Image (cartoon, rainbow, N blue to C red):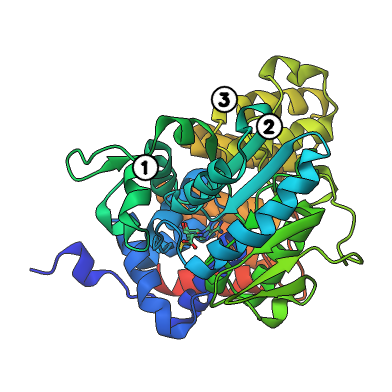
Amino acid sequence: MPNDRDTEAAPDDALLTAFSGYITQHLGLHFPRGQWPELVRAAQALEPAGADACMRRLMAAPPTRGQIEQLAHQLTVGETYFFREPAVFDALEHEVLPALIAARRAAGRTLRVWSAGCCTGEELYSVAILLQRLIPDLADWRISLLGTDVNPAFLRKAEQGRYRDWSFRAVPAWLRQRHFGPPQDGLRAIAPALRRGVRFDYLNLAADLFPGPEAGAPTMDLILCRNVLMYFEPASAARALQRLGCALAPDGWLAVGVAEAGHALLAPFEPVRFPAALLYRQRADAPWPEARPAAAGLPCAVPAAVASPVAAAAAEPVPALALRARLSADRGLLDDASLCCAAAIATDKCDPALRYLRALILEEQGRSGEAIGALRDALYLDPDFVLAHFTLGSLCRRNGAAREAQRHFANALELLRGHPPDDVLAHSGGVRAGELADLMRAGAESA
Ligand SMILES: C[S@@+](CC[C@H](N)C(=O)[O-])C[C@H]1O[C@@H](n2cnc3c(N)ncnc32)[C@H](O)[C@@H]1O
């Protein structure tokens, strides 16, 4: 007898085209047709009911932080090791860092380094080891070493700072012995002083607020974003590079991977050639616009350090509350998101977008019945709210209310007919009318 998986529809080209676009939009990653099997495998791993259902469910609404993490867990590449690409570390040790240290010694003894796409932490700890070697009076400095990644499993390993021999494949034995403890259960722990000096945090380079002026913080002196953007779709890589440029100090440096160096997308930075490596410097006439604050339209999640306490929510104006609700929801802080959203609705009872946001938060909290109520409220306030029809249809279908689901899907399709395919739908996080229509037609065929 066939089981459910045997009868599950395989994703067709239209669905896979839409899903790879969705992955690019929300994670930056590029999955051309030849790599679609990886998308199918990832979706299958996430949903026992099958890849097709998983893709449709995910695309029904802007992804939550939890969904992004699950996708990242399936789709990111975790290859890294200490002092990877030694020529880059040679240039850092002998040229770049000594010059930066000399400049910063004369100006407050502060140095900020960011490993963007840090994976399991080897790259950032390698820089920490260099700095320990290069700055004899380290205790008198304020050094910020930040590692960020979108894959929480990698971040957990980075925080633990315990590594197998494979991570040391490019370093001499003395370095391993000097900076790591003896092996225990096949793992060596990084020296506590190095471990204490670094910080790891979640950050999606395709969406979140970047540390630096975007987050109201100072600029970075050195950014390492190596072997990360080579997996990005070019337009997403260009956007990330622009934002990295905004985050970089006027005399700051950018290190990319050996395979990425020389790429045309790096043209806005000034290339500097070292014996066996190519690094980049901020140009004097850097083309970046002023770093815009989050509220001006950058898709972002606010770092924990930037978020303000829930108790202050009621005093904030509605747009700020709505933004905070979205950012907290992105970070998985659902209680905070819920409180901010409720406070916003209490002040502005007639905004359908707030009701929609409330529905997304409720759904994420597993309160489907209330989410359906909030979507009905949104549609009462704006009967033409396409995405609310679509999301309500999806929730009804999942809850077994097939006829109501059908009605909302039909309404959404009817409304979509009034939009050119390239129209970005309101409150959708960037979904275009044509994409949603294709998705719905594909869904109707397989329902
Ligand atoms: C091949 S590793 C590179 C690690 C390290 N930078 C190096 O060169 O050894 C790529 C890393 O990029 C991360 N990554 C991929 N997409 C990302 C995104 N959208 N935001 C943040 N990190 C991302 C992956 O999780 C992975 O840890």
The amino acid sitting under disc 2 is Arg
Q: Does the rendering let one see residue 429?
A: no
The quarter in which the C terminus is drawn is bottom left
Give the mark, 2 or 3, whose residue is nearer the N terminus. 2
Q: Does the rendering let one see residue 348?
A: yes
Give above or below for 344 relative to 12.
above
In the rendered structure, are the residues bearing label 1 and label 2 in contact, judged by CB atoms less than 8 Å apart? no
| SS of the residue under disc 1 | helix
| SS of the residue under disc 3 | helix
- Give how far apart the Cα atoms at labels 1 and 2 are: 23 Å
In the rendered structure, are the residues bearing label 1 and label 3 in contact, judged by CB atoms less than 8 Å apart? no
183 vs 23, left or right, is left
**Assess mark 2: CB under 8 A from ligand 1?**
no
Residue at image mark 1: 178
- Give how far apart the Cα atoms at labels 2 and 3 are: 34 Å
Q: Quadrant of residue 6?
A: bottom left
**Assess mark 3: CB under 8 A from ligand 1?**
no
Q: Quadrant of residue 223?
A: bottom right
Residue at image mark 2: 142
Q: Residue at x 80, y 63 (%)?
A: 282
Give the mark, 1 or 3, whose residue is nearer the N terminus. 1
The amino acid sitting under disc 1 is Arg
The amino acid sitting under disc 3 is Asp
Label 1: few (<14), some or many (≥20) within 10 Å?
Answer: few
Q: Quadrant of residue 269?
A: bottom right
Residue at image mark 3: 335
435 vs 381, left or right, is left
In front: label 2 or label 3: 2
